[in-house]
Amino acid sequence: MPEPFPSDFVWGAATSAYQIEGAVREGGRGESIWDRFAQVPGAIEDGSSGDPACDHYHRFGQDVQLMADLGLGAYSFSVAWPRVLPRGRGAVNNAGLDYYSRLVDALLAAGITPHLKLYHWDLPQALQGWGGWDNRDTAKAFADYTEAVARRLGDRVSHWTTHVEPWCVAFLGHYFGIHAPGIRDLDTALQATHHLLLSHGWGVQVLRDWLPVEVQVGIGLNFEPTYPARDREADLAAARRYDGFFQRWFLDPLAGRGYPEEMWDLYGPAVPEMEPEDLDVVAQRIDFLGVNYYNSATVADDPGAEPLRVRRVPNPDRERTADREISPEGLNDILMRLYQEYEFPAFYITENGAAFEERPSGDGAVHDEGRCRFLQAHIAQAARALEQGVPLRGYFCWSLLDNFEWSKGYTIRYGITYVDYATQTRTLKDSALWYRDFIQGVAPL
Ligand code: FCB
């Protein structure tokens, strides 16, 4: 194992159901909010949808083999709620659970540990009809869905994540309106946040009830360590507000501190409604925090930009991927901060990766040098954190495959494996080959 990573450090790759599975009308699957949202003209940059994406539903055997060839120790995937409960609640669709059961068995047979995520954004459309995450009943439905999955897969899956990036669900989906369900309303976004966190708490309780004690349970958040544009009080205060909006609004209640007071004041009448016991439910003990990291944020004070009065400013010193600035040191900053300011027992980097516009070259290979450098630079920052004492247990690269990148459709590619969507051929990019060799200890950072 490459220094300074311990021999039990987990090297994996991550995906999500809607982005790779396709087969949206097979196996009794119900409609999800992303199936519906993708039909809205202009919602997806290239007019596409998650059907058929990588056709992973039919090709998972081949994809598990690919992971085995790369020497991955773990695979982080999500279960599609509408496959398990086509209408969000009520009768369980066993064919949907059978599919994930086969996937889990294939992983275990290949010596790959399944890390299962319950919610990566594909809410059953039927629940959206009742208000979706704005409705407290959706959090209850999530607990029932969690139970259905736990009862079926709990004997074989050791690592469980309730939610992935609830910030994106709440704000991209309900405030900026660029993700499903496409709502633009602050009250709804904040209420959705609360119901997402509440459903996490109830989900953890259900998992603890149904699963063996040694099973590891956590949640995955996305982070944007935030820096002021200039060293002046107005920008420092703006950075604190953006941090409250992006990080602490989720971290603090999970850590038992309630919602950050200054954000509560700032949001004024838009703050969520809640029941007296909710904050205790949200603050369930978890075994790990999943850290999804892509970029940092540089911000300036902007009195006109309600409600946060913050403007993101580009940092011209930074190189860029197809869609973001590159700032590897932000990964170390956020890990150190989480370690020093919060008492989570362990961390996984549950997503980290980059999009570029590469294509296969004449020799058939995909020379994605930019992604190789990106992964190396970020893994080096993870190594620094480990050396400084952070209880970091694993690293999952986003993503195993090129896939449906939400509102950007298929216009950008995050995979370490190139997918030719016309033929569904997979080609390992140079970054995948480097990752394989690095994991084996034969390629340096
Ligand atoms: C993350 C999402 C993931 C993918 C990457 C690029 O925020 O969790 O599904 O879109 O960004």
Image (tube, rainbow, N blue to C red):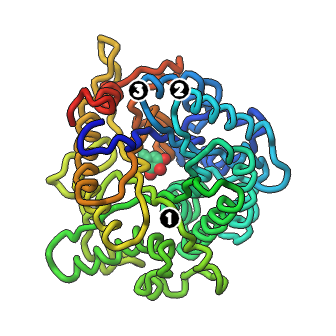
Query: In x, y percent, where is residue 132?
Result: 68, 63
Residue sitting at x 22%, y 71%: 228
Separation of disc 3 and disc 2 at Cα? 11 Å
Tag 1 near tag 2, CB within 8 Å: no
Nearer-N-terminus badge (1/2): 2
Residue carrying label 3: 70
Above/below status of 440 relative to 4: above
Q: Nearer the viewer, residue 269 or 2?
A: 2
Neighbourhood count class around disc 3 (C-alpha, 10 Å): few under 14, some 14–19, many 20 upward: some
Q: Secondary structure at mark 2?
A: helix
Task: Give the quarter of the figure containing the C terminus.
Answer: top left
Say whether residue 169 is left or right of residue 296.
right
Amino acid on which the number 3 mark rests in the picture: Leu
Q: Secondary structure at mark 3?
A: helix
Q: Nearer the viewer, residue 215 or 88?
A: 215
Say whether residue 121 is left or right of residue 70.
right
Residue sitting at x 67%, y 54%: 211
Q: Is residue 235 visible?
A: yes
Residue sitting at x 65%, y 61%: 208
Amino acid on which the number 2 mark rests in the picture: Asp
Q: Which mark is residue 171?
A: 1
Query: In x, y percent, where is residue 173?
Result: 55, 60
Mark nearest the camera among 1 and 3 is: 3
Separation of disc 1 and disc 3 at Cα? 35 Å
Residue lying at the far top of the rendered structure? 363
